[in-house]
Image (cartoon, rainbow, N blue to C red):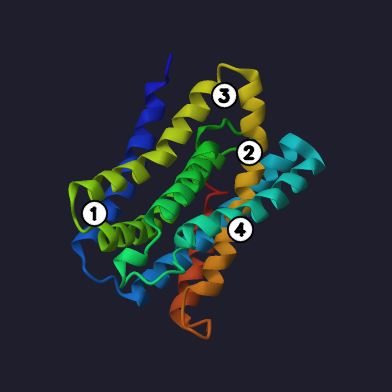
Amino acid sequence: MLNYLHLIPNTLLFLLTFVAGIIAFRLKIIEDKNMNLLLAFSGSFLLSITFLHLLPETFEELGKSAGVYILAGFFLQLVIQKLTHGVEHGHAHIHPGHGQNIPLLSILAGLGVHSFMEGLPLGFNYRLPNTDTALYLAVAAHKLPEAMLVATIIRTAKGTSLTALGMLVLFALFTPAASIIASFLGTRYHAISQVVGILIPIVAGAFIHIATTIFFESGTKQHALTWQKTVAILTGVALGAATLLAH
């Protein structure tokens, strides 16, 4: 029987993603400076949680073989990026000014895989304290700028039609759905639980790729480390470290 308490955080994650997308639908322009600072914060927070929580969990669970899966996940993200054109790390390698040139189906397919992957660790039972909560917060922070950019691309290609709204709903559902599926099947079938345990370091490798790419691509054209970006990064790292102290 499905654990209905597990539905609450996943419902909140869906709403957070959907509302962020709706905000982007309503705003014609999202200032690059504000978006870059949000990306810097979410990227540093995601990277901190990956190093402080996910990696210790995976090495404790799988031993040295975890490194192979982490490396595979890092390069798998390169393949996914070919489909998404970089939307998942907040920098689309396309020109949204020409809606007819946007490979929308490719982007949504790649983001579907990416979003499903990042939802799988949310449905796993962890040995170390605070890992599940910290990971949930990191994924939620990552979904904010991601959803805004996705919604901007959808709006540019499809306008504000019901089709565009349906695409946003579908995107917002992928991560919570993966979390629910992983939790439901993982607690009932040992083989599924083992598969999810292997997928987690793969996702961790993808997170490392995404977060480090955010650092290089968010900011000025010369990739300068401004004081605002420095503050955003340090805030993300500090909050990530604080999750080790929470009980």
Circle 4: is it few (<14), some (14-19), or many (20+) Cα within 10 Å?
some
State the image quarter where residue 141 is shown.
Answer: bottom left
- Taking the view exactly as shown, the residue that stands out farthest to the top is 1
- Taking the view exactly as shown, the residue that stands out farthest to the right is 64
Which residue, given by chain and number where applicable, does mark 3 sit on? 186
Is residue 74 at all visible to an observer of this figure?
yes
Q: Amino acid at mark 4?
A: Leu
Q: Real-space Cα distance between discs 1 and 3?
A: 33 Å
Q: Earlier in the sequence, mark 2 or mark 3?
A: 3
Q: Earlier in the sequence, mark 1 or mark 2?
A: 1
Q: Real-space Cα distance between discs 1 and 2?
A: 31 Å
As drawn, the label of residue 199 is: 2
State the image quarter where residue 166 is shown.
Answer: top left
Q: Earlier in the sequence, mark 1 or mark 3?
A: 1
Q: Earlier in the sequence, mark 4 or mark 2?
A: 4
User: Which secondary structure lies at badge 3?
Assistant: helix
| Mark 3 in CB contact with mark 4 (< 8 angstroms) | no
As drawn, the label of residue 22 is: 1
As drawn, the label of residue 78 is: 4
